[in-house]
Amino acid sequence: MSKKVIVWIHGSNGMGKTTQSRMLIRALAGEVEGDLIQGEENGLNYIYTKFGTDVIVIGKMGLNQCTGIDSVFSKLKVDGVTKSIEKALNEKDCPIIVVECVFATMKWYKSWVESGIRKRFKLLVAFLDANLWNNYNRIAQRRAVKQNRKDWWNILLEDTVYKHTGAKNSEIRTIFNKLSGTWKDGEPKLADCLLKIDATIPKDKVHEQITNFIMENI
């Protein structure tokens, strides 16, 4: 492997991005506890979690606590995510770096290019896809689990959930199309390898597709 690999697990709210990150950690590093590494450099915060010599997850991540970048994004912001990736790339080991966050935008990619780190890694994008109706259903199902209920179809979602999830579902498709070079004619493909996965299938099947995708492209 000449370059380190970034696996960007991409998707809307409730698509299982962090669950897949945790499953990937276990597949690559086993049950090892992660070492949280954080600090500040040139006015930018960085946070990542290192699991042995096998994998790094940007943000905070525990085997029994899923947080990823989401819980620390207000501290990192876009440039802090870039700084975190830069620091992770500087690690001598850990060839695979996992990135996932519901707040991801194309500004992330632009920041990687402007900072000069984009040329240092191979970018694999695994897109957890679901139409808007299934997206709402997934959120209701997650709430039902937290409330120990089986009748997820009776879970009422707030108007703000419909509004924000609708916007996010559209945005993540735009990001994926831009990364794949299908947004507009003539625009280049930005990611090295891409995979679209049906997020409504069982999580073990999603995990299998992601791990196969990685093994085929590292």
Image: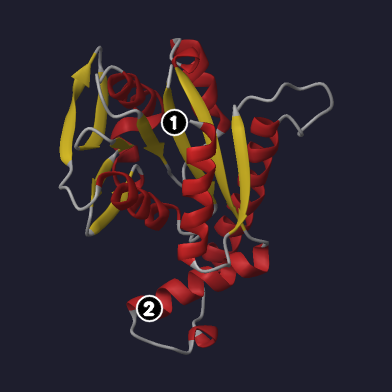
Q: Quadrant of residue 194?
A: top right
- Number of the front mark, 2 or 1: 1
Residue at the image point whose x is 76% and y is 34% from the top = 182
Residue at the image point whose x is 37% and y is 32% from the top = 96
Query: Please, what secondary structure does the residue beneath circle 2 have?
Result: helix
Could one spot residue 13 in this view of the protein? no
Q: Mark 1 — residue?
A: 6
Q: Do the residues labelled 2 and 1 touch (CB within 8 Å)?
A: no
Q: Which of 43 and 176 is in front in this view?
A: 176
Query: Please, what secondary structure does the residue beneath circle 1 have?
Result: strand
In the image, taking residue 204 as reference, residue 53 lies left or right, namely left
Q: Mark 2 — residue?
A: 145
Above-or-below relation of 71 to 165: above
Residue 2: percent from the left, percent from the top? 43, 16
Residue at the image point whose x is 57% and y is 73% from the top = 137
Disc 2 residue crowd, few under 14, some 14–19, many 20+, Cα 10 Å: few
Q: How many labels does the image show?
A: 2
Residue at the image point whose x is 18% and y is 43% from the top = 34
- Mark 2 or 1 closer to N-term? 1
Residue 125: percent from the left, percent from the top? 55, 38
What distance separates the C-alpha of mark 2 from that of mark 1? 31 Å
Residue 44: percent from the left, percent from the top? 28, 20
Q: Nearer the viewer, residue 52 or 76?
A: 52
In the image, taking residue 91 as reference, residue 190 lies left or right, namely right
Callout 1, which amino acid?
Answer: Ile
Q: Quadrant of residue 144?
A: bottom left
